Image: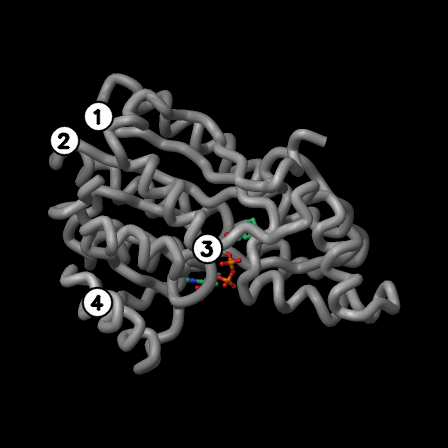
């Protein structure tokens, strides 16, 4: 599968799943636009490493996905967008009656509204190019719920719903829109949850991972960022042309329970 000549924008890609997907997209030949809200030398160095290793024109563009105008400006600054992966996301865990209002607003803005703004800006470019792929990183929490994750579950269900709408609005065009729904993938977002889980359940690290974090993941293994990249590259292939408006679970059996 060659993505040579395609530009892939991946929001929230200086770490975790976004970075793993960026590597796989660039290995397949795409020029990748990495993104986050910071503008550090390390961010640009990540893009340079990928560009040097894969021979692609991979760049880093700073944009804060909590801000509508910056979401849209990211796409404009990239100058082209054949593949849009909406991946930026944050988490906060608290009971709904204690959930901080500013955390709710931030999660809805970054995990859901950013995908609306980037998609709105990217679709005209895809239409002009005559080809496009919208790939949203939702979650098993886009299909099922867990307690204490009200904003995250609401945002991810919203992403799945919006993915279906984008697919229907582009159904007769050479553009597809799908959502990947990962279970647990070992990334900084998950790493951050381990100390609290150990403390809350008075468990050592391995027990907290197996019995709490991976409790609902029957494979008892984390998915990898490379596997997420492989699924994303597949969604860009000719074989996936008629896959649109759906979810692809990569969750070790979670949603089969
Ligand atoms: P991560 O913390 O490694 O990555 C999150 C990325 O989003 C980072 O690059 C971060 O800089 C970026 N980001 C955060 N706020 C931003 C903002 N305001 N503007 C721009 N970028 C911002 O976490 P991850 O696990 O790689 O998560 C990536 C996506 O995958 C998220 O949407 C998450 O909900 C989803 N997801 C993760 C898992 C998992 O187990 N790791 C499971 C299901 C879904």
Residue hosting label 1 = 174
Image mark for residue 68: none
CB at disc 4 and ligand 1 closer than 8 Å: no
Of the image marks 3 and 4, the number of the one nearer the N terminus:
4
For the residue carrying disc 1, how many other residues have a C-alpha within 10 Å: few (<14), some (14-19), or many (20+)? some
Is 81 on the left or on the right of 226, as rendered? left
Identify the secondary structure beneath mark 1: loop
Mark 3 vs mark 2, foreground winner is 3
In percent of width and height, residue 119 lies at 33, 41
Q: Nearer the viewer, mark 2 or mark 4?
A: 4
Going 31% across and 72% down the picture, which residue do you hit?
46
Q: Could you tell which of marks 2 and 1 lies nearer the N-terminus?
A: 2
| 1 vs 3, front mark | 3
Judge whether residue 21 can be spotted in this image.
yes
| Residue 59, above or below 72 | below
| 110 vs 203, nearest the viewer | 203
Q: Which residue is mark 4?
A: 53
């Amino acid at each position: 599968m060659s993505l040579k000549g395609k530009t892939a924008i991946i929001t929230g890609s200086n770490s975790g799943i976004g970075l793993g997907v960026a590597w796989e997209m660039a290995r397949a030949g795409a020029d990748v636009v990495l993104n986050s809200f910071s503008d550090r030398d390390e961010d640009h160095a990540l893009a340079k490493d990928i560009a040097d290793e894969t021979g692609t024109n991979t760049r880093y563009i700073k944009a804060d996905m909590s801000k509508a105008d910056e979401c849209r400006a990211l796409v404009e600054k990239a100058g082209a967008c054949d593949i849009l992966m909406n991946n930026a996301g944050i988490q906060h865990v608290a009971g709904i009656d204690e959930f901080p209002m500013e955390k709710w607003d931030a999660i809805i803005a970054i995990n859901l509204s950013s995908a609306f703004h980037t998609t709105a800006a990217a679709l005209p470019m895809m239409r002009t190019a005559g080809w496009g792929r919208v790939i949203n990183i939702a979650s098993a929490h886009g299909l099922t719920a867990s307690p204490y994750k009200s904003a995250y579950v609401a945002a991810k269900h919203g992403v799945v719903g919006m993915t279906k709408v984008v697919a229907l609005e582009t159904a007769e065009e050479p553009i597809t829109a799908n959502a990947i729904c990962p279970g647990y993938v070992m990334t900084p977002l998950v790493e951050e949850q381990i100390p609290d889980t150990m403390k809350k359940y008075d468990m050592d690290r391995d027990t907290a991972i197996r019995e709490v974090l991976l409790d609902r993941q029957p494979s008892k293994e984390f998915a990898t960022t490379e596997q997420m990249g492989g699924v994303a590259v597949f969604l860009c292939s000719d074989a996936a042309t008629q896959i649109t408006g759906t979810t692809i679970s990569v969750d070790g059996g979670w949603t089969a329970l």
